[in-house]
Image (tube, grey):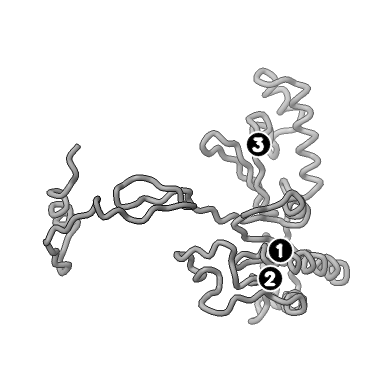
Amino acid sequence: MVHTFCVDGRYLALDVDSGTVHLLDEMSYEVISRWEKETPEQIIGELSGRFDEEELKEVIEEVKVLIAGGTLFSYDASLHTVPSEEEMKPGVIKAMCLLVAHDCNLRCRYCFASTGTFHGQRLLMPLDIGKRALEFLIERSGSRKFLEVDFFGGEPMLNFGVVKQLVAYGRELEKKTGKTFRFTITTNAYDLKDEDIEFFNREMSNVVLSVDGGYALIADGKRRKLASPKRKNLRHLQRTDQFVELDGVTDKKLRNVLKQYQACD
């Protein structure tokens, strides 16, 4: 199953079974939207008035390559069949989140992970623990073929050497067991190198990026770069000597109280 949609001028296709998101141009978007309902010849005949015919043929060949590679119009039988009795037994699992780093290179104070430590020690997962986790997932996966592993933190790139070794170990286990790992990494993408990105493209089914805004609003209402925020300037603050009782307060009452203090231009 493939969902095609347009958001903010970007043409996208989501291959549901593989979880792959494709960024498209308008021509490939139109081709993929028609793929399951029309033959390639019909698609060319319908779209040749809008697009160059030779380019349409090139797009069709590219779509065929993606289909053969399992990232477009893919089919995962486990998603379309009723789970077996074995899979319905308590304890059968198909996915695992590995906290490979209880630390982060940004250490934002507002983070749910408490600057990356989850209120614990700053530690990195040893390789042997990660290997045992992958083995455990296989042992408890029942008849499920596709298994999902998310490298999480903290910031998993702080332990990227172990991540790469675990992916390699997972590929070895695939050959021995017939299972297939779909690896994902969740990262702030700070200071990624070209070789890191190449590894993601080669080995990761998905890369999840956590991106924060670049500005903060300070007391005077001006935007400041988060990299070098200024302290609040008390010249922009004043006491009102007024208190609002919160019991029974409504939005309307609060707005009326604040309205008298609105700044005048």
Asked whether the viewer can see residue 21, the reply is yes
Identity, as a three-letter code, of the amino acid under mark 1: Ser
Side of 235 where 81 appears, left or right? right
Q: Quadrant of the C terminus?
A: top left
- Secondary structure found at label 1: helix
Identity, as a three-letter code, of the amino acid under mark 3: Leu
Nearer the observer: mark 1 or 3; the answer is: 3
Tag 3 residue? 24
Farthest bottom residue?
Answer: 90
Residue at point 65% right, 55% down?
A: 207
- In the image, 248 versus 6, the foreground residue is 248
Residue at point 54% right, 79% down?
A: 120
Nearer the observer: mark 1 or 2; the answer is: 2
- Secondary structure found at label 2: loop
Farthest right residue?
Answer: 176
Q: Quick one: label 2, few (<14), some, or many (20+) residues within 10 Å? A: some
Residue 52 placed where, x, y %? 72, 20
Farthest top residue?
Answer: 49
Tag 1 residue? 78
Q: Are marks 1 and 2 in contact (CB under 8 Å)?
A: yes
- In primary-sequence order, the first of circles 2 and 3 is 3
Identity, as a three-letter code, of the amino acid under mark 2: Lys
